[in-house]
């Protein structure tokens, strides 16, 4: 295949401008490092001061203590700007590095003059995103990363059959810290990129690869349409790593974007065309129809709180066994009516227990239906009572995370999982619930926490983290005296 840069004019628009050099900071994507910018930087050095920045646990950057959040990452980047006295810079970010560039522009807008976002992970159907991330996690946790690299390479570059390109990308992925990679992947999954783009006031260009199979030109164009001062350009003959496949084209559009700011007054009118507004309404409406599953969000760990479709239900939970019954249905989703009689009213005769269950179910049902838009969260038949719909519960998340941490074999990932659990633990575990059916669940959680605390204490190179985790274990009276 003949690449476009074979006949591209190498003279960038910036090389014709007079005046002091401006500063560009390059931020690589997830799993990569700053060495991959070497194909692009030769086209920038003559016109700009070029600085590279590595994500936590990537390249030359030290491993970031887990857990990681966007606030920490932004703080680290702003510290980098402060340390190097960088006050007026242009950011070029690829992938997750583009997400960080957007976050930085929102955090310190006066210090960021422009953004060039390459293959930004923006608008993408949620189901596709979820499956893609699950596949990456499984491959990343395999015994070696050869399968992972083989799987991901064709989506990154049109030059995936080149031994040199494969070697450069492989070296980057082989050296990345597993725990930091997985945590950053989770941040990417949970990030509301579109909301960030809507809030941008920084002049921005988004570049997408013509042959990118993940963030296709259509998806990239939709993402760019949410940026008030946004521009979008397709890079021909490129996949996701546009700066690797087509460095001259990438440099040309980045330089053109920056030079336009230098030669013209910045347009502060953020009014979007009516056609774009209409497009966004159609997208929003379609997403609502696609994901119009009734959502029940329940919190038991730090305090009791329940929301139906985003609306909190503050009252009625201390009556007619409502809170306990809801907790029971969450922990025992396949329980029969007979099991419920035995567990919830063990000392009552059958007829009285049946009456109590009927009254309590009617009360719980009336509470849940207040904002359920005509749909039912509670499904009741002659044998079973079950909760249905999109149910999220912090206690169920804790149980799931403990199970994953106990089974994890990769030590880096296991540490990340344990510290994530520690970060979200309450002061007291399920205090106020004393029934036999809940004590079994609490005992199992405490046993798993104890086992994980002992495991952490055995990791000599993780002494500080072990002390922290040991503290939470003692605080919850979990560790047995030795």
Image (spheres, grey):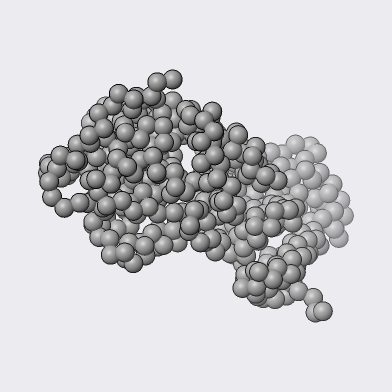
Residue 387 placement (x, y as % from top left): 67, 43
Task: Say whether residue 454 is visible.
Answer: yes
334 vs 426, nearest the viewer: 426
As displayed, is residue 5 above or below residue 376? above
Horizontally, is 314 left or right of 113 in the view?
Answer: right
* Residue 298: percent from left, percent from top: 59, 53
Q: Whole-percent x and y of residue 427?
A: 62, 71
Task: Report whether 308 appears left or right of 21.
Answer: right
Q: Is residue 438 above or below residue 284?
A: below
Residue 79 locus on image (x, y percent): 37, 65
Q: Residue at x 79, y 75 (%)?
A: 480
116 or 227: nearer the viewer: 116
Q: Quadrant of residue 413?
A: bottom right
40 up-or-down from 469: above or below: above
Q: Quadrant of the N terminus?
A: top left
Q: Residue at x 44, y 39 (%)?
A: 121
């Amino acid at each position: 295949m003949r690449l476009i840069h074979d006949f591209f004019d190498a003279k960038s628009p910036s090389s014709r401008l007079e005046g002091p050099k401006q500063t560009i900071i390059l931020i690589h994507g997830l799993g990569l490092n700053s060495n991959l910018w070497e194909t692009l930087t030769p086209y920038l050095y003559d016109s700009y001061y070029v600085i590279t920045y590595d994500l936590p646990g990537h390249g030359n950057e030290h491993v970031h203590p887990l857990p990681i959040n966007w606030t920490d990452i932004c703080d680290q980047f702003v510290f980098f700007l402060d340390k190097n006295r960088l006050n007026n810079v242009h950011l070029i970010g690829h992938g997750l590095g583009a997400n960080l560039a957007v976050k930085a522009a929102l955090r310190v807008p006066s210090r960021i003059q422009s953004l060039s976002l390459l293959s930004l992970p923006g608008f993408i159907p949620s189901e596709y995103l979820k499956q893609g991330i699950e596949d990456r996690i499984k491959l990343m946790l395999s015994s070696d990363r050869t399968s992972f690299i083989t799987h991901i390479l064709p989506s990154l570059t049109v030059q995936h059959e080149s031994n040199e390109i494969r070697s450069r990308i492989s070296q980057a992925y082989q050296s990345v810290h597993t725990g930091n990679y997985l945590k950053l992947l989770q941040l990417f999954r949970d990030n509301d990129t579109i909301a960030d783009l809507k809030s941008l006031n920084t002049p921005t260009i988004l570049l997408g690869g013509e042959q990118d199979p993940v963030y296709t030109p259509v998806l990239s164009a939709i993402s760019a349409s949410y940026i008030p001062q946004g521009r979008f350009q397709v890079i021909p003959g490129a996949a996701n790593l546009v700066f690797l496949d087509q460095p001259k084209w990438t440099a040309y559009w980045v330089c053109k974007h920056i030079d336009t700011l230098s030669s013209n007054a910045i347009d502060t009118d953020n009014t979007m065309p009516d056609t774009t507004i209409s497009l966004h309404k159609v997208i929003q409406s379609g997403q609502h129809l696609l994901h119009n599953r009734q959502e029940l969000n329940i919190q038991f760990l730090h305090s009791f709180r329940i929301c139906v479709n985003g609306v909190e239900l503050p009252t009625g939970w201390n009556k007619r066994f409502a809170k306990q019954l809801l907790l029971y249905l969450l922990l025992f989703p396949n329980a029969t009516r007979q099991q419920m009689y035995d567990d919830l009213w063990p000392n009552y005769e059958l007829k009285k227990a049946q009456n109590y269950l009927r009254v309590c179910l009617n009360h719980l049902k009336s509470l849940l239906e207040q904002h359920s838009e005509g749909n039912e969260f509670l499904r009741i038949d002659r044998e079973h009572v079950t909760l249905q719909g999109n149910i999220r519960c912090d206690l169920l998340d804790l149980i799931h995370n403990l199970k994953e941490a106990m089974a994890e074999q990769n030590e880096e990932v296991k540490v990340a999982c344990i510290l994530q659990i520690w970060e979200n633990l309450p002061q007291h575990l399920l205090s106020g619930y004393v029934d036999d059916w809940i004590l079994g669940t609490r005992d199992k959680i405490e046993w798993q926490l104890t086992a994980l605390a002992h495991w952490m204490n055995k990791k000599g190179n993780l002494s500080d983290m072990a002390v922290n985790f040991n503290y939470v274990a003692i605080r919850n009276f979990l560790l047995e005296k030795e």
